[in-house]
Amino acid sequence: METVVIRRTTNIFPIEEPTVPKEPSPEPPVNRSPLQDDPPRIIINYPQTGRKILPVGSTTINVKQKKVTLPGGDVEPIYAARPIKTCRSFLIYVDQPVDIRLTRRGTLLFGSSIFPEWTRVTDAPEFGNINITTTTDTSFYIAMAEDPDGVPEYMPDRRLSPAAYLGYNAADELVSIKKNINGTVYRRDIDDPDIADKVVTKWVEYGAWTPT
């Protein structure tokens, strides 16, 4: 009987090193846009383009609600890129004298008369409403800003040097002066008691001033 020889064998497998998870790399810092931390101060204007003819009466602009209430009760919106609560400066145009009042929560902060042409008011009290009172139909535009010096400067040539016209009577005596601003003619007669004839027979135009 043959002898059976039993041999033990062992399967040898390579030992794998345990996998250690790597720590995630730190994320690079996020460069925040100025819009996220400090929104830029904006300008709102009415009307959005061109100018508006305000009828006789009281017009009120509510900054927070972004609306304009006209004398007849009609309400028109004002566009703004984001909500705003108050303003600190404004640029206004009128072609007739008007009265304005700045208020906040019912408290009068500033009141004044505005005369024809462009008027820029900076570093104004923080106002939420502006009221414009007109006594005749008035061409109107306004821009308002949160920044105390935020509204643009507007310096047209006509503002610096409108063309003037001098009126003379038959004896070549100066009796009247007039000028044209944005299509509106303003005239002032010279009240000189030594001049009897106040009838203008000749106008002499003096052109607009120009920088040198």
Image (cartoon, rainbow, N blue to C red):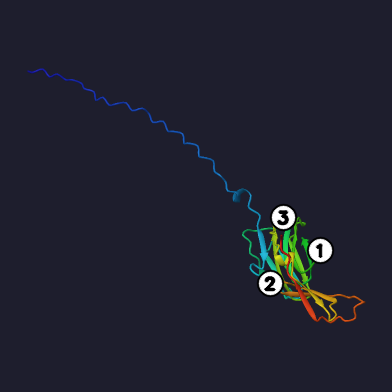
Nearer-the-camera pick, 103 or 208 = 208
Q: Is residue 16 left or right of residue 85?
A: left
Label 3: how many Cα within 10 Å (few below 14, some 14–19, many 20+): some
Which residue extends farthest right? 193
Tell me which amino acid carries mark 2. Answer: Lys
Q: What mark, if any, has residue 28 been given in the picture? A: none
Q: Amino acid at mark 3?
A: Asp
Residues at badges 2 and 1 in contact (C-beta under 8 Å)? no
Asked whether 177 or 70 is in front, the reply is: 177
Which residue is label 1 attached to?
111
Q: Secondary structure at mark 1?
A: strand
Q: Quadrant of the N terminus?
A: top left
- Mark 1 and mark 3 residues within 8 Å of each other at the beta carbon: no
Q: Earlier in the sequence, mark 1 or mark 3?
A: 1
Other-residue count near label 1 (Cα within 10 Å), few / some / many at <14 / 14–19 / ≥20: few
Residue 149 lies, with reference to residue 18, above or below; the image says below
- Quadrant of the snapshot with the C terminus: bottom right
Query: Quick one: label 2, few (<14), some, or many (20+) residues within 10 Å?
Result: some
Q: Is residue 174 left or right of residue 55?
A: right
Query: Which residue was labeled with disc 3?
Result: 149
| Structural distance between the alpha carbons of marks 1 and 3 | 19 Å
Mark 1 or mark 3, whichever is nearer to me: 3
First along the sequence among labels 3 and 2: 2
In the rendered image, which residue does mark 2 sit on?
Answer: 52
Q: Which residue is located at x 65 percent, y 66 percent?
A: 78
Q: Nearer the viewer, mark 2 or mark 1?
A: 2
Q: Which residue is found at the position 60% from the left and 51% from the top?
A: 35
Quarter of image, res 41? bottom right
